Image (cartoon, rainbow, N blue to C red):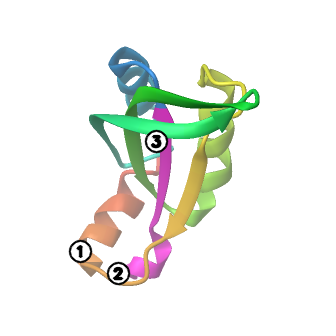
């Protein structure tokens, strides 16, 4: 059985629900993520082009394994509409081992 240390959560945000849904579906269909959750909208405030911007965004959280992270990040970057997309990778330190096994199983062909 796989341990929870073998799960990573990859997060990004985009400015349209349709784009978030497409990123989620592509990652799961390609077995780069076992699942992807889309949430939002959320208002993000940030610096961009020397000014403070506020934009409604949609968050996508992908559940994957460490060996699939690089390919998932590459796919997100290639299909992301932002010039500098937020892509954050977090390793899970504890959780349900059965879920970890499920994530591992569904990121394989």
Q: Residue 98 location in percent, x, y?
A: 23, 74
Image point 68% across, 26% down: which residue? 78
In percent of width and height, residue 74 lies at 69, 38
Q: Which residue is mark 3?
A: 31
Name the residue that disc number 1 marks.
98
Would you say residue 109 sits in the magenta stretch?
no
- Crowd band around label 1 with a 10 angstrom C-alpha radius: few (<14), some (14–19), many (20+): few
Asked if residue 85 shows in the view, the reply is no
Q: What residue lies at 36% left-to-right and 15% top-to-bottom?
A: 18
Residue situated in front as seen by the camera: 29 or 15: 15
Across and down, in percent, residue 60 comes to 39, 40
Q: Earlier in the sequence, mark 1 or mark 3?
A: 3
Q: Kindly state the secondary structure of the residue where label 2 is placed.
A: loop
Q: How many marks?
A: 3
User: For the residues marked 1 and 3, what is the alpha-carbon distance in whole angstroms?
Assistant: 18 Å
Q: Secondary structure at mark 1?
A: helix
Q: Which residues are magenta?
A: 1-13
């Amino acid at each position: 059985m796989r341990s929870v240390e073998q799960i990573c959560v990859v997060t990004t945000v985009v400015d349209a629900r349709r784009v978030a849904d497409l990123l989620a579906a592509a990652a799961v269909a390609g077995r780069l993520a076992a699942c992807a959750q889309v949430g939002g909208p959320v208002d993000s405030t940030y610096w961009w082009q020397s000014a403070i911007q506020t934009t409604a965004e949609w968050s996508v959280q992908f559940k994957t394994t460490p060996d699939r992270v690089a390919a998932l990040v590459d796919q997100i970057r290639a299909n992301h509409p932002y010039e500098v997309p937020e892509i954050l990778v977090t390793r899970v330190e504890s959780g349900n081992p059965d879920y970890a096994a499920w994530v591992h199983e569904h990121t394989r062909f």
